[in-house]
Image: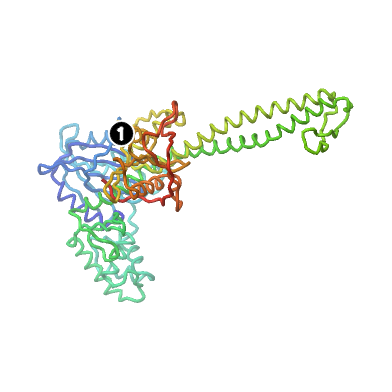
Amino acid sequence: MPMDGVMLGFMTRELNEKLAGGRVDKVTQPERDELILTIRNKGENHMLLVSASANSARMHLTREKKNNPLEPPTFCMLMRKHVLGAKVNEIRQIDGDRIAEIDFEALDEMGDYVIRTLVCEFMGKYSNLILTQNGGKIIDSVLRVTDEISRVREVLPGLTYQRPPQQGKLNFAALEADALEARLRGADGPAFKALQGAVTGLSPQTAREIMLRAAGDSEARLEEVDVRALAEKVCALAAAFPGLARPTLALDADGRAADVTPFAYLTRAGFEQRPMPSLSEAQEAYFRTRDRAERIRQKASALNRVLKNNVERCEKKLGLQLSALQDSERMEEYRVKGELLSASLYQVERGMKEIELPNYYAEDLAPLRIELDVKLSPAANAQRYFKLYQKARSARRLAADQKAKTEEELNYLEGQLENLAKCGEEAELFEIRQELEKEGYVKPSHNRREMKSLPPSRPLKLNASDGTVILVGKNNMQNDKLTFSAQPNEVWLHAKDMPGSHVIIVGENPTEKTIGEAASLAAYYSKGREGSRVPVDYTLRRYVKKPSGAKPGFVIYTHQKTLYAAPREVIARD
């Protein structure tokens, strides 16, 4: 569920209990809209992640160590200046809404203690992190909001911080039955929507959960319930919620994290609900894959555009080359006409527009009509056809050569698009960018937010049903390293005649079943993954060679066999 008011209430209580009284030892900003504060408290180090990402705004403790820019962003430097070494006084939620505040007690330039507050607004695309002091004066924010962006509220250094408009909603943390009843009586339709409109910070999911617990039906309509009784039950639930704390991770049928709730939601009864030691651990388990994939997708978007633009360029070029080859098919026609004219010049008179001559190259000597240029002599007309023949022959040779190069480039670019889609780590994305820079498709980056050196990425490591290890390369650099570090007698696989991953079965003499499972992986990690049966070549690694000067990931191979496999990812990971 999103970081709505109810979720944030549980989270701030958990964080305040763990962090209040601690000191800020370190501040980093791995992403443009994300801070990590390392806070030492009661002999332990805690890493507090606070994100203003539009798609995953949140706060929780984390154990994941992220890569940071070579040069810290401006807001990171500012946070270090104002809160490094500061004491965490309190972490609290504001009026049951999606706003949390972290108070830091720190020394100012004069050596006096001051309170600085990091205001964390978790409001979808309007999320922000704002540092204030002296009664709300804004020091700075992760996202500056000018009057051109918002006429309602500016967020700029030097201005006084103002909370987002409340729209007159009731505070869920301090609900009163009379006030809630008055709001609900003025509405109709689904009760959860009316509740969401009356109370601050409620997501549709939480509003449905409250209705299920209070009215027995998450989709109950106000016309069908006793509004007074409903209001009283909702208020009782609101008061009881803090005591229900039991962080839960909802898992789908494949065992993947599908949702996080502060306690077991009845509306999530269709999922496996796994209790978690803390809400922070539940949040991290949920966002670990989801947020990383979203970040990778955002960072890959520029490379994706570059690759698609170059694919379109190659496709247009290939079309022109194919057209030139088709035009060159008249080459023999030009030669025959030139030969016939040269052999029959005595029959051609100057000024003729055309002439029919016996075609000695045809079995039945059928007459061939030859168009003539009235301005040229008979001999010059014959030479004109010979020149057209030479031009068409040269064009065919050139177009055929260019066509082969264009097809090779197109295959490379489509392979890079496949590699980009398989990226799951920042290191893999970085390697693809490095390769594209080397090949001249992308200009070298001199961005001040360039990341620190990343460790080399590693191929995907999976287990076949009999426990045999299968390695899958996810980009060209991985493919080359994987293939040419394998043992000569290990089996190598690749989808036939299409971009895809190199796959190695570790060890010699694998079973036919293992080869079939590896082939399914090769099909899944290829351009043909949407098909039902994909041809996959396999051979021993000793028969795989890399031509001199070939692009990364390109190989040739012999002694191969081909089988047809259904694209499928082996779930077991080593």
* Residue indicated by mark 1: 456
Q: Quadrant of the N terminus?
A: bottom left
- Residue 430 seen anywhere in this rendered image of the structure: no
Quadrant in the picture for residue 562: top left
Vertical placement of 401 versus 294: above or below? Answer: above
Q: Residues within 10 Å of mark 1 (few under 14, many from 20)?
A: few
- Residue 16 seen anywhere in this rendered image of the structure: yes
Quadrant in the picture for residue 277: bottom left
**Please, what is the three-letter code of the amino acid marked with disc 1?**
Pro
Vertical placement of 334 versus 289: above or below? Answer: above
Nearest the eye: 530 or 188:
530
Residue 287 percent location from the top left of the image:
29, 49
Vertical placement of 52 versus 382: above or below? Answer: below
Vertical placement of 274 versus 292: above or below? Answer: below
Quadrant in the picture for residue 233: bottom left
Q: How many marks?
A: 1
Residue 37 percent location from the top left of the image:
22, 40
Nearest the eye: 343 or 109:
343
Q: Quadrant of the C terminus?
A: top left
Q: Secondary structure at mark 1?
A: loop
Residue 318 percent location from the top left of the image:
58, 36
Nearest the eye: 169 or 557:
557
Q: Is residue 302 left or right of residue 82?
A: right
Please report the residue visible at 30 percent of the width from the left and 68 percent of the height from the top: 211
